[in-house]
Image (spheres, grey):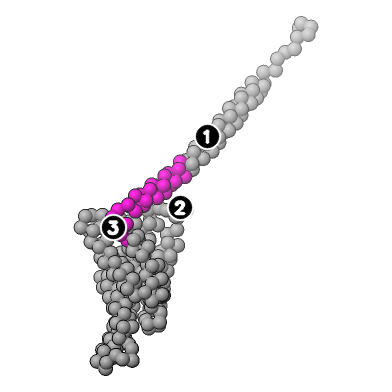
Amino acid sequence: MLKGFVRPNHGLAPYYGLLRNRNCILKKTFTYNLIKEKFYSSRNDNSDTLKADLKRNNNIKSLLKEVKTIPNMITLSRIISTPLITYSLIHQDYTTSISLFSYAAISDFLDGFIARRFKMNTRLGSILDPLADKILILSTICGLYQVIPTYVFSLFLLKDSLLIGKSFISFLENKKNNFITQQNINLLQVKPTYISKANTAFQLFYIGGLFVFLVYKKENNDEDCDAKKKEKIEHLDSFFEYFGIFVSTTTVLSGLSYLGPRFIRRYLK
């Protein structure tokens, strides 16, 4: 044997080398897959967020475009006229209040007619129109607090509170991360029933009649007024008392029709 020559040991050495190379490859592959998974998951999350933001922005833009339609402009003008009606009532300027209230009552019919006739129905209109009616009626009866019976005012207020509460409960049951979504807009939309439409007409007629009665009573309630006019005033007092009971009844029926039998069975047991 030659001096300095070492016989190579071919036992398991080659296999150890293969195992080391394979472990390196596995580690690199695992690291690559982990980075790839994190990258794509974060990219998918970002894309979902961007899609949600785009939907929300599109919903906002579509609602802003709907403001420019003629029916919605009429509805907004009714909302703007409401504080003026209340102010004129507080200062007993009945001529101005009757004029503004007449415009508001006519606009309530006009915006719906134009929307149906010319196919201008919008999501915003289905939200604004009943809201404008509630603002008009509640603000007006607040100005007539010295004349209108307490139970009539309480029932008007209770009905609107129940409707708002129902919408709030429905929103909580279908809560989304973004408030401005199509589903949340649908929850705010109000589909009026036949009894609710009739009730709104009766309420407006009741309040408008009270306006006219106040003017007539103010002009003919002097001591020099003849007996016939005083008797007429008493008859009108009785008429509006009974008519207030009738309107209160339709208000209760209207509120129940909005809530529906399923809601009543669930929350009013």
Disc nearest the viewer among 1 and 2: 2
Tag 3: residue type? Pro
Quickly name the residue at label 1.
36
The answer to whether the residue labelled 3 contacts the one labelled 1, judged by CB atoms less than 8 Å apart, is no
Q: Quadrant of the C terminus?
A: bottom left
Quickly name the residue at label 3.
71
Mark 2: few, some, or many residues within 10 Å (few <14, many ≥20)? few
What SS does tag 2 mark?
Answer: loop
Q: In x, y percent, where is residue 206?
A: 29, 78
What SS does tag 1 mark?
Answer: helix
- Name the image quarter holding residue 102: bottom left
What SS does tag 3 mark?
Answer: helix
Mark 3: few, some, or many residues within 10 Å (few <14, many ≥20)? many
Q: Residue at x 31, y 80 (%)?
A: 215
The answer to whether the residue labelled 2 contacts the one labelled 3, judged by CB atoms less than 8 Å apart, is no
Q: Residue furthest bottom?
A: 227
Quickly name the residue at label 2.
178
Mark 1: few, some, or many residues within 10 Å (few <14, many ≥20)? few
215 sits left or right of 40 in the view: left
Q: In x, y percent, where is residue 105?
A: 28, 68
Q: Does residue 51 show up magenta in the picture?
A: yes
Q: Residue at x 29, y 90 (%)?
A: 225
- Name the image quarter holding residue 205: bottom left
Q: Does residue 186 show up magenta in the picture?
A: no
Q: In x, y percent, where is residue 75?
A: 32, 61
Q: CA distance from mark 2 to mark 3?
A: 28 Å
Q: Residue at x 45, y 58 (%)?
A: 175
Tag 1: residue type? Lys
**Which region is colored magenta?**
47-75
Q: In x, y percent, where is residue 114?
A: 23, 58
